[in-house]
Image (cartoon, rainbow, N blue to C red):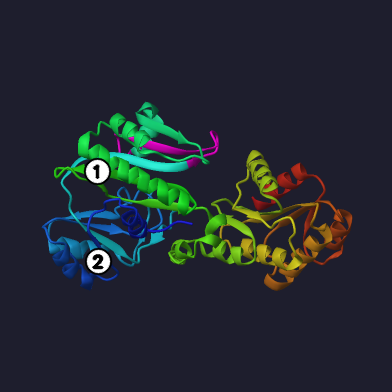
Amino acid sequence: MHIHEYQAKTLFRQSNIKTPEAILIDNTADASSACDKLGGNIWVVKAQVHAGGRGKGGGVILCRSLEEVESACDKLLGSNLITPQTDAKGLPINQLLIEGGQNIERELYLGLLVDRQTQQITILASTEGGMDIEKVAAETPEKIIKFGIDPLGTLNEESCLSIASQLNLENDLANQFSTTLLGLYEIFTEKDVSLIEINPLITTAENNLIALDGKIDFDDNALYRHEDIVELRDVSQEDEKENEASEYQLNYISLDGTIGCMVNGAGLAMATMDLIEHHGGSPANFLDVGGGTTAQRVAKAFELIQTEVNVKGVLVNIFGGIVRCDLIAEGILQAIEKVGLNLPIVVRLEGTNAAAGLKLLDESSADIYTEADLTQAAIKIVELSK
C-alpha cells in the first residue's frame, strides 16, 4: 500500500525526522492564507499523488509570488498528473502540499528496502540525490552506498555515523543524519514497510538536514496489524478494477496488452504471460484466481477482463490441483451468460476433472475454443486476437 508525501512526512516527524513547514489544501481559495501562515516569499506547490517523478511531470512548481501560487493551484487541482511512473492516463490530483522555500546547499538520497538477494534490510544512500537518482543508479552505481542489516538484528548509531561520513557529512549534520536514519529504520521495522525513501534529503545554509520529500510503501500482507496505516489509504489513487478484484480475493493487475489472462497460481500466470509474449502477443493483465477458487470468483474474473477496452481475446489457463476444472468451466459459462461473449476465448484445462470441464465447454452453445496443450492455446489466442 502506498501513501501520500504529506502522510509520510507526518510519520517522519513522529520519529524525529525534520521536514519543511507545510500546509495541505484541496482548493485554490486556501492558497493565499496557507502562504501567509508559512511566511517568506518563495513557496513550492506539490501535487499529492501516488507516483514518483512528480517534478519531471510538472507536479512540483516553484512560486515566487502569491499570484504564481494560485496559478499553480488552479493548474494542478482537478487534473491528472502523468509522470514516468504512471500510465498514460496519470493519477488524479485532489490535494496539494504548499511548502516554504528552503536554502538548499546539497541534495542527498536516503532509503531502506527489503533486499531479497541478500535477505537483509538494506540502506541505500548517495551524494547524488534529486530527480535523476535512477540515472545515477544505472550509470554510476559506485555512487550508491549500500549497507545491509540483519532482519533479526538492529541498526546502531555507529553504523549511521559511518554512512554519514561516506556522504561527507560532519559534526552536527552527521548527528542529524544519524537521528534521521534511525527514525527511518524505526518506521520501517515497526510499521512493516517494504520501501521508505527521502529524495532529496537536503542540507541547508542554516546547517539543517531536512527531508524535502518522502515516500513509504507498506507490505499489504501486514496491514491487518496496522489499522492506523490502513486509515491513510486513498483509493482514488488506485486502479478501480484492482480494488474490485481484491474484494473477491482475486489478484489482478492491469497491463497495456491485448490478451486477457485468467490463471490459477502466480507462477503459472507469469509463465502464461511469457508464453503469450513469446508467440507475438501481449498480456492485458495479470490475474491469479487462486488455488481454491470458486465458480462465482471465476465469473467475476471473467467479467473484469471483458471490461478492459483494449482486450481483443482471452486465454484461460487452469491447472486443477485443489480447484476442480469442471467448476472453472461452470464459472466461465456463468460469466458468459451474465456479461455476454464478444471476444474470442481459448480455454486450456489440465488436472482434476479436466476432461469433464472441457466437455462442459465443448457441449455448451458458447463459442469457445478449447486446448489441452498450453503452447497451442497461446498460439491460438494470439492468432484470434489479431
Residue 237 x %, y %: 44, 62
Q: Secondary structure at mark 1?
A: strand
Q: Which residue is mark 1?
A: 202
Residue 68 is drawn in which quadrant?
bottom left
Q: Which mark is residue 279?
A: none
- Image side of residue 31 versus residue 154, left or right: left
Q: Is residue 283 magenta?
A: no
Distance between the alpha carbons at the discs numbered 1 and 2: 28 Å
Residue sitting at the far top: 142
Q: Is residue 118 magenta?
A: yes
- Image side of residue 116 versus residue 26, left or right: right
Total numbered circles: 2
Nearer the observer, 188 or 97 = 188
Q: Residues within 10 Å of mark 1 (few under 14, many from 20)?
A: many
Q: Secondary structure at mark 2?
A: helix
Q: Residues within 10 Å of mark 2 (few under 14, many from 20)?
A: some
Q: Which residue is mark 2?
A: 74
Label 1 or label 2, whichever comes before in sequence order? 2
Q: Amino acid at mark 1?
A: Ile
Residue 383 appears in view:
yes
Residue 129 is drawn in which quadrant?
top left
Q: Amino acid at mark 2?
A: Asp
Read off the magenta span.
114-132
Name the residue at 43% across, 54% down: 88
Contact, mark 1 vs mark 2 (Cβ under 8 Å): no
Residue 85 appears in view:
no
Name the residue at 29% across, 44% down: 200
